[in-house]
Amino acid sequence: MTAWTWEHEGYDPADARLRESLCTLGNGYFATRGALPECSADQVHYPGTYAAGCYNRLTSEVAGRHVENEDMVNLPNWLPLRFRLPGEAWLSPDTAPVLDHGETLHLSSGLLERRTRYDLGGGRALLVRQHRFVHMADPHLAGLRTEFTAEGYSGPLETEAALDGGVTNAGVPRYRDLDGRHLTHVLTGTADADTVWLRCRTRTSDVRIALAARLTSPAPVTHRHDRPRALQTTRLELVAGRPATVDKVVALHTSRDPAISDPLHAAVDRVGRAGSFDALLEPHLTAWDQLWRRAELDVPSEAGRILRLHLFHVLQTLSPHTADLDVGVPARGLHGEAYRGHVFWDELFVLPYLNLHFPEVSRALLHYRHRRLERARAAARDTGRRGAMYPWQSGSDGREETQKLHLNPRSGRWLPDRSHLQHHVGSAIAYNVLQYCEASGDEEFLHTKGAEMLLQISRFWADSATHDERLGRYRIKGVVGPDEYHDAYPDAAEPGLDDNAYTNVTAAWVLGRTLDVLRGLPEPRRRELAERTGLDDSELDAWDHISRTLHVPFHDGVISQFEGYGELAELDWRGYRRRYGDIRRLDRILEAEGDTVNRYQASKQADVLMLGYLFSPAELQAVFRRLGLDLDDRTWRRTVDHYLHRTSHGSTLSGLVHGWVLARARRADAWKFCQEALQADIADIQGGTTGKGIHLGAMAGTLDLVQRGLTGLETRAGALRLDPVPLPELSSYGFTLRYHGHWGVRLRLERGLLEVTVPSSGRSPIEVHLPDRAVSVQPGETDRLVLPD
C-alpha cells in the first residue's frame, strides 16, 4: 500500500459490500461500484451503476399504507464477464477455491486493479488480472480489461460478457419492502460483429437509457440475446504461462444528456468511434493528472493518505463534468442506494471545498437549487407562507422526497418520519450562495440567481417568524433541528420544536446578509428584482427588525438546543453504553425499548455546535450582537462542553463538526474527533452503512477541515483571511486554491510559518490578512509570513 493506492488483500464475503463502495469508479456523470465482474447481485455482492440525477418514482404498500418514493435508479449492469472451463460451473470466489485474491485502487489514475488465482484442482490454477476505468475524459465511456493466465495446464476457457437489464434497486435491506423495479421495456440487439446494445426506460420518469458494449478478444466473438441480457461469448485457447486478454469497452447515454437525440444511437456511435482500451487510457490518465493538480493536497502520514482517498471519491461524484448537468449533491455519492440517492443539506459540507478548486461545479450545483426555486415557493404557499421552503430531501424536480415512514430495524416497526420539518436546509442553501460568490468573485451570479434565492429564502424566514409579546422577540415554531433525534416535545400531539437555536441564529444571519446583498445591487437590477417579486422598503424594514430580535433560548448559562431543552431528563449514558456498546443510533435503541429520545437531553449529532462550524468565532459573536445577545468565549466553551457530553454521534458529520469546533475551543480533544471523521467510511464506524454508499459530506468535510478549519481561512471582502490553529498531530501541510480567477494559489503551513505562492498571471495581487497584519502578494511571487503565537 502506498500514498496513492488503496489495497484490499484476501477475500472475505463479509467485507465485500464495503470494498465495493470504496472501490467505486466514477467521473461525475456516472459511477459503478467495485463489484467483481463474475459475481451477480446477491446477499454478498452488489454491482450497481448510477447516473447522476437519474431518478424514478414508484408507489409501494408499506404497513397498510401506499407510500411513494423516488430513487436514484440502479442502471443496467455493464460489468458482467464470467468464465469457466468447458462443461464446468462458472468460477467465482463464492463457488470455487481461491488461492489468493487482491484489489488495488489506484488513486492517481482512477484505475481499479484486481487479481485472483483460482484453484482448478490437479495442480492447475487460473490467474485472473483485471483493470477497470470509468473514463474521466469522456464521461460516457468505461472499460474492463481481463487477462487470463493458465498455470500448470493448457486448454480452452469459455468467457461470457453481458449487458444486464434485469437489475433492480435492492442494495439497502431496509428498503426491500419497497418496489425496486425501476426499469421497463428492455430490448437488446447487435450493432456489429463485436458490439451489442441494450436499451430500456424508467417506469415513471420515462428516462431512456442505452448502453453499447464492444468486446475484443484473440478468439472469435459470438453474440446471443437472452432478454433482458445481451450476451457476447468467446472461447480462448490458453497456453500455460501465456496471458490471453479480453477487452470490454462500454458507452452509456440517457435521454437527460445535453445535446441528445436518441440515446441508443449515441451509445452505439460512441463505442464504435472509441479507440482501443490502450488508446482510451491516455486521455483518461491525462484528465486525472489535471484534476490532481487543481486539487493538490500535501498532508503527511496516514491522515494524508485517507484525505487523498476522500478527495478521490469527491472528484468521482462531482467532477468538472458535473458542470454540464442538472444535478445536486447526493448524500451518499454515486456509490450506492442509501438515502435513495437523495439530495439533503450535505452540500453545506461539500461546496466550501469545491468553491476554491472547481467553482464551475459549485455554480452548477447552485443552479440545481435555483431551477427548483419555484417548486420551493409552491411548497411554502401550500403551508400558507411566503417565500421559498426548500425540501429536506430533494430528487429530480425539487418536491419534498422525505419518506412518510421509516423502519427501525431494531424493533421492526415503521414509524412516522418528521425530518421534513428541517427547514434549516434553506439557510444552508443561502450560506452556499454567499460562500461561492465570495470565493469565486462571481458577481453576475450573486446579482441574479443568487439574489433571487436569498430573497425568497429570507421571505420564508420572515413569514415563519411570529412575534411573542411576552418575550418581545420573534419565534420560529414547529421545526426540527440538525440533531434529528428530537422531532417533538414529550407526549405532544403535534410534531416539531420551538426556537431551535441553530435554525433561529442562521435565519437571522440569512436575513441580515440578504439585506446587505440587496442594498449592494446595481440600482437597475434591484429595481427589476423588486418589480418581479413585489419587494418594498417596508418588507426590508421588517426583515431587519426580525433579524435583530429572533429568540435564542439559554439554560444554565449555555445556549439551549431549543426552547424547553433544559427541562428534559438526563440520560444514563454510562448505563446505555454498558448495555449496548455502540449507542450511535440511540433513537432506535430507545424506541425498541418503548421509550423515546424526545424525553432526554441527547443528540444524534452536532446541532447548536454547527454554529461554530459555519461561523468563525468573531463572526458568530457578531451575529449574536446583532441579536442583542452577548456570546463571550466562556459561554461558548460551556456550550461546547455541555453538548459534547450529550451527543451520541449517530452521523458521520458529527465527528467532523466536533473536530472543527474543538480545534479552537478545546484543542487537546480535537484530534480524537478529526480521526473519527477520517475513519468514518474506511473503518465503517457506523456498522455496515458504508457498504450502501460512502458519506460524501463527511469526506469533503475532512478536506475542508484542512483547507478552512485549521487555517481559519475565510474569503471575505475581497481578501483571503487566515487565522491558523496548528494541531500537534497535523501542523504541517499544504494545498492549492483557485481564488478570484487565480489558478494554483499555493498555501503551505509549517512550524509557525505560512508560505503563499501566487502563480504568474495578468491579474491583480491577492490580499492576505492575518490577525496581526495584511500583505499583498503579487502574481509570480512567494511570501513567507511568520505566524503570531
Image: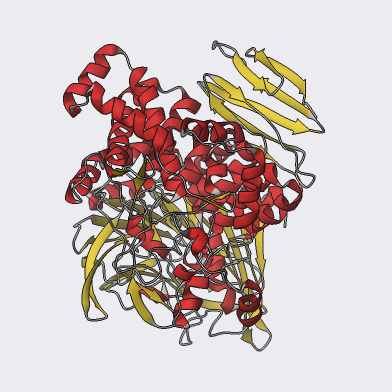
Whether residue 39 is visible, yes or no, is: yes
Q: Residue at x 46, y 47 (%)?
A: 502
Outermost residue, right direction? 751
| Quadrant of the rendered image containing residue 688 | bottom right
Please tell me how many numbered marks the rendered image carries: 0
Report whether residue 187 is seen.
no
Between residues 706 and 41, which one lies in front from this camera angle? 706
Q: Which image quarter: residue 510?
A: top left
| Residue 247: x %, y % from top left | 47, 59
Q: Residue at x 30, y 69 (%)?
A: 493
Image spot of residue 545 (x, y percent): 35, 30
Position of 352 relative to 87 (above/below): above
Give x and y (percent) for residue 314. 51, 48
Kindly give the residue lying farthest to the front in the view shown: 470
Is the image coloured rainbow, by chain, by secondary structure, or in one colour?
A: secondary structure
Quadrant in the picture for the N terminus: bottom right
Quadrant location of the C terminus? top right
Q: Quadrant of residue 73?
A: bottom left
User: Is residue 440 depicted above or below 489 in this figure?
Assistant: above
Left or right of 90 on screen, residue 232: left
Left or right side of 200 for 33: right
